[in-house]
Amino acid sequence: MRALLLLPLLVTFALSGQDGAGDGSPVSVLGSKWSKARRTIENPDAGSTAPAPAMTSANKNFERNKRINDPAGVRDPNADTIDARSAALEKSVQESRSPKTKTVDGFEYRVKVRNASAKAVEVLFWEYQFTESSNPSNVVRRQFLCGVQIKPDKEKEVLAFSASGPSDVVSVESLSKKSENLFGEKVVINRVEYADGSIWQRKDWNFAEVRSAVARATATPWGTEMCRGL
């Protein structure tokens, strides 16, 4: 994990006073909120899908010849094949047609935390829980993995973006109670990784259950985002 360290639209819910240290967590939850949001991200479809150029006998020996006999600046022989020229042209066409970014509608989850330990926090696993008021058995967990730097006795606002909202399914009974809050909300700290390599983990949280999700979340280089969903 050390390698990681790498417009809200509608009504935003007010900060709520919460304390995540009741289960022994060294990171206290001071407040949380969520809102609908819109993000502009890099378009993964903007890359080229042109076929790879054909392999030639000259290509196979190009690097060796360049080092031994060829003068400096010699042209790659593979660039002269029909496939290579076609691929270059197709790439130019695709890049002109595909926007470099796209807009995604989703949700922002914010939590303000305090590092109550004597060690610097580097990685944080946490979740935003939603419990349907009229159906308490319906609990939705939005889990996040965040690369953070929180010094001892310091506070930090952590921001996560997800395409998933508070709940995928809501009972008809809940929808009929428009004047009441549909969900009870709670933020839970699941795991804390420190800069010195030590770890704190909530007793009833199992890292093995999210191992594959963590692998997916860390499979590509991180940009400017602080958190990724699990």
Image (cartoon, rainbow, N blue to C red):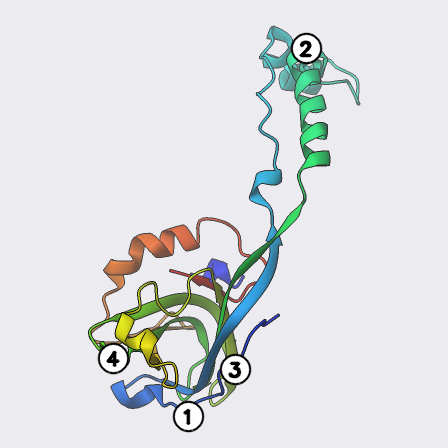
Disc 3 versus disc 4: distance between alpha carbons?
33 Å
Q: Amino acid at mark 3?
A: Lys
Q: Amino acid at mark 1?
A: Gly
Label 3 or label 2, whichever comes before in sequence order: 2
Q: Residue at x 47, y 80 (%)?
A: 33
Label 1 or label 2, whichever comes before in sequence order: 1
Disc 1 versus disc 3: distance between alpha carbons?
15 Å
Q: Amino acid at mark 4?
A: Ser
Q: Which mark is residue 134?
A: 4
Query: x, y percentage for residue 198?
Result: 34, 73
Nearer to us of marks 1 and 4 is 4
Nearer to us of marks 1 and 2 is 1
Disc 4 versus disc 2: distance between alpha carbons?
66 Å
Label 3 or label 4, whichever comes before in sequence order: 4
Label 1 or label 4, whichever comes before in sequence order: 1
Badge 2 is on which residue?
82
Report helix, strand or loop for mark 4: loop
Q: Residue at x 32, y 88 (%)?
A: 21
Badge 1 is on which residue?
17
Report helix, strand or loop for mark 2: helix
- Please tell me in which quadrant of the rendered image residue 105 appears: bottom right
Report helix, strand or loop for mark 3: strand
Q: Amino acid at mark 2?
A: Ile
Q: Residue at x 70, y 13 (%)?
A: 77
Q: Is residue 168 above or below residue 110?
A: above
Badge 3 is on which residue?
156
